[in-house]
Amino acid sequence: MPPPIFRNGQCLSLAILSDRQSWLNDHLYDLVLAWIHDGHRVLWTHRIEELQPGDLCFYLSCGQIVSGEVLAQFRNNLVVHESDLPSGKGWSPLTWQILEGRDRIPVTLFEAADQVDSGDIYLQEWLEFEGHELIDELRQAQAAATLRLCREFVNRYPELLQSAKQQNGQESFYPRRTPENSRLDSSQPLAEQFNLLRIVDNEKYPAFFKLNGRQYSLKVECLENDK
């Protein structure tokens, strides 16, 4: 059984589980420090077996499968997902929506449940893009929203639980992205494939195309701002 909650401005026992290679880790330091500054106890790990019983556990940029036994160690288990659940469950939702041409994208904080991305929703905010942002800017906005939602949940806990909303509507799923998803069509203009260029990682999964029996990589960066 998790330990009791310390109310009236006292500390909560918080945990974060993230994948070791996630780009989000660079931003999670700020979240950990903010919670420690607020007086909470914080454990941040990349290994499920290192989690310890506590009040809240946040699974952020975490693709690991967490058992019901692990979830039972905490009073609440939280996930942040960039879609208007139950639409857009699955992998890399922000990336897929940018490819679909969307520039208004929700970020949702919800309860982890046995079925993937199916728990009650507690908080949501919407990101607004202008259509020119590349991956670093997209990630910066995503990370900032993630940290805001996590901090708000903790600040309003446990009263916020009373406003939980069940997911409602038609569910859909995005598949896991692979290197092949960064492939450009050499017969089409770059302008028509710009959304793909916006979401590729120049180092980990760069854009590429094949022509005349050879494969070429293509890196993209913004060199100047006309505004």
Image (cartoon, grey):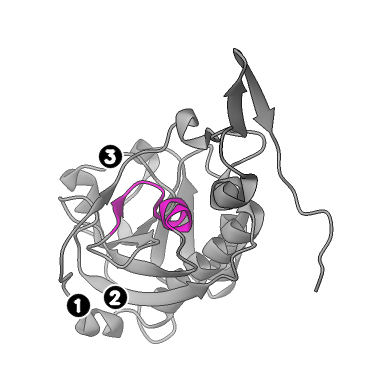
Marks 3 and 1, how far apart at CA: 24 Å
Residue 44 screen position, x and y as percent: 48, 50
Q: Which amino acid does label 2 sit on?
A: Tyr
Q: Is residue 161 magenta?
A: no
Give the image location of residue 15, x and y in percent: 41, 56
Tell me the quarter of the picture where residue 75 sits. bottom left
Q: What's drawn in magenta, residue-wise?
A: 88-100
Q: Can residue 25 be seen in this view?
A: no
Q: In this view, does 85 lie above or below 162?
A: above
Q: Residue 122 carries which label?
A: 2
Q: What numbered label is drawn on residue 207?
A: none
Looking at the picture, how far across and down is residue 225, in whole percent? 81, 65
How many discs mark residues in the rendered view?
3
Could you say which is closer to the camera, residue 196 or residue 8? 196
Q: Do the residues labelled 1 and 2 touch (CB within 8 Å)?
A: yes
Left or right relative to 164: residue 137 = right
Mark sitting on residue 165: 1
Question: How many C-alpha atoms fall within 10 Å of the one at disc 3: few (<14), some, or many (≥20)?
Answer: few
- Pinpoint residue 102: horizontal percent, then vertical percent: 45, 64
